[in-house]
Amino acid sequence: MNVIDSCWRTKSDWAVNRKALANCVVGYGKATLGGKYGAIYVVTSPYDDPVNPKPGTLRYGVIQSVPLWIVFARDMVIKLKNELIVNSFKTIDGRGAKVEIAYGPCITIQGVTNVIIHGISIHDCKPGMAGQVRSSPTHAGMHGGSDGDAISVFASSNIWIDHCYLARAKDGLIDVIHASTGVTISNNYFTQHDKVMLLGHNDKFIADKVMKITLVFNHFGEGLIERMPRVRIGYAHVANNKYDEWKMYAIGGSANPTIFSEGNYFVAPDNRSSKQVTKREATNWQNWKCNRQRMCL
């Protein structure tokens, strides 16, 4: 049991003291509060309305302007009708229920702070359509459509994504871009996907230099091809993750990122042409700052 899990799983009263989970985050997302200082909000219905969400639905909870700790009354599959735009100081806590966000657009975290997503399955995500989407109780605006990421983190800070199952999105499983920072991605299981995780918008977006992200205790499972993660410009601490037989490469990057990789366990594929652990997508890769310690190959 790792330090995150031992922080809450060993407590017999975790179900009645759910907000103690916010004390368990490690790494660059350590300051993330989520909805720790808000009320408990219970999702009772998988129904979704992107513009006028009903009380008891997930969307109604995540758009509120006050901190909320969001839990689920029962198992449910939520097929969103458009991207789910999460407001600041929210926790989506799936513990105690089997919660899936699937078969439609998925989660967008944009221009906000202090969001925790824990213990849900996010899979088979589709692009969102252009149209109105509500982002707060007082604002529903036109959106041009989403790319089909499972989780998109855009210009946000203090974000923790923990113990989620992520698979089969149209675009990436997790994208962290546009100067997002203070992010921890931990204990997640990734499977059945091509471009898994992008950290950094593009090679010329210098604002991503502030990006600091921790990837720890994740399992990159079967059927993954590349980007576990791919890093641009910013800093990524990649530690104690398990990699199973990727199809192209595991960790890659471009535009002079800093990658500190330690304690990871790599099981390379049998295909000799696909055993590349790291990939440098630039001719000036000699200038990168890359530190690899205690890695098992």
Image: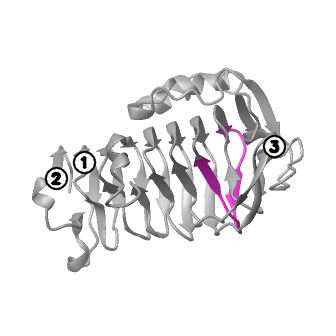
Image quarter of residue 147:
bottom right
Distance between the alpha carbons at the discs numbered 1 and 3: 38 Å
Badge 1 marks a residue whose secondary structure is strand
> From this viewpoint, which residue is outermost toward the left?
286
Q: Residue at x 48, y 58 (%)?
A: 190
Q: Position of residue 49 (x, y in %)?
A: 84, 56
Distance between the alpha carbons at the discs numbered 2 and 3: 44 Å
| Amino acid of disc 2 | Trp
Earlier-in-chain disc, 2 versus 1: 1
Badge 2 marks a residue whose secondary structure is loop
Identify the mark at residue 288; answer none if there is no mark: 2
Distance between the alpha carbons at the discs numbered 2 and 1: 8 Å
Which residue is more in the foreground, 171 or 188?
A: 171
Q: Which residues are magenta?
A: 92-109
Earlier-in-chain disc, 1 versus 3: 3
Give the left or right position of residue 239, taking residue 81 as reference.
Answer: left
Identify the mark at residue 60; answer none if there is no mark: 3
Q: Residue at x 89, y 41 (%)?
A: 55
Which residue is more in the foreground, 218 or 253?
A: 253
Residue 79 visible in the shown view: no
Mark 2 touches mark 1? (CB < 8 Å): yes
Q: Residue at x 80, y 56 (%)?
A: 50
Q: Quadrant of the C terminus?
A: bottom left
Badge 3 marks a residue whose secondary structure is helix
Q: Quadrant of the N terminus?
A: top left
Which residue carries the number 1 mark? 259
| Amino acid of disc 1 | Ile
Q: Nearer the viewer, mark 2 or mark 1?
A: 2
Give the left or right position of residue 279, taking residue 286 as reference.
Answer: right
Q: How is the image coloured?
A: one colour
Q: Position of residue 266 (x, y in %)?
A: 27, 57
